[in-house]
Amino acid sequence: MAQAAAEGIARDAIVREIEQHLHAESTQDLEALLAGMTVDCYNLVMCDPSPLYLGPEEVARRYRGLWATFPDLEVQLRRVVAIEGSIAVTEHRLSGTHRGPLFGIAPTGRKLTVDTCVVWEFVGTRVRGETVYFDLATLLRHAAFLELPGGAGRD
């Protein structure tokens, strides 16, 4: 019973850290974002042409680029899928106005939305890393950069 209580406390602390992290992303609070991460932190963005951002400086560069692309970025936690040991899996919805380059695509001024799945790695209650998955084709369709046959109205 004590172990279950300890696991519940650890789970609650991890969920709180994820919520704080996403709030820092949405408010562009780089200091708070990095304060919740370890010194050997990383971001692995699976569809990024250069997917690995290793260490605080690279992670900060990734977020600055994200905020330049979407100055009004909003990240909403949709649900916590699982937490097991030091790993958490969550689903989010990212939205923002495309005002900067996105994977080499010039700004469109369009409001873009994409659902994401993130696998978080924790050391205690601090984020060591995020592996981010999302459907790039959906994002490109929202940006009016990609049109798929028979895909009209399917977002």
Image (tube, rainbow, N blue to C red):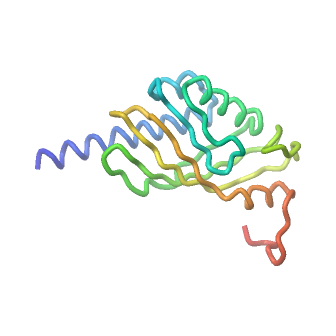
Q: Residue furthest left?
A: 1
**Residue at 59% in and 53% down:** 133
Q: Position of residue 29 (x, y in %)?
A: 60, 26
Q: Position of residue 10 (x, y in %)?
A: 28, 40
Left or right: 6, with 62 as reference point: left
Closer to the camera, 153 or 88?
Answer: 88
Count how many numbered circles sit on residues in the image: 0
**Residue at 57% in and 48% down:** 132
Closer to the camera, 39 or 63?
Answer: 39
Left or right: 153, with 42 as reference point: right
Q: Position of residue 15 (x, y in %)?
A: 40, 43
**Residue at 56% in and 31% down:** 54
- Residue 50 lies in quadrant: top right
Closer to the camera, 43 or 28?
Answer: 43
Closer to the camera, 24 or 3?
Answer: 3
Q: Position of residue 147 (x, y in %)?
A: 85, 66
**From what the image shows, is residue 70 above or below residue 4?**
above
- Residue 86 lies in quadrant: top left
Q: Quadrant of the C terminus?
A: bottom right
**From what the image shows, is residue 89 above or below residue 86?**
below
**Residue at 51% in and 42% down:** 130
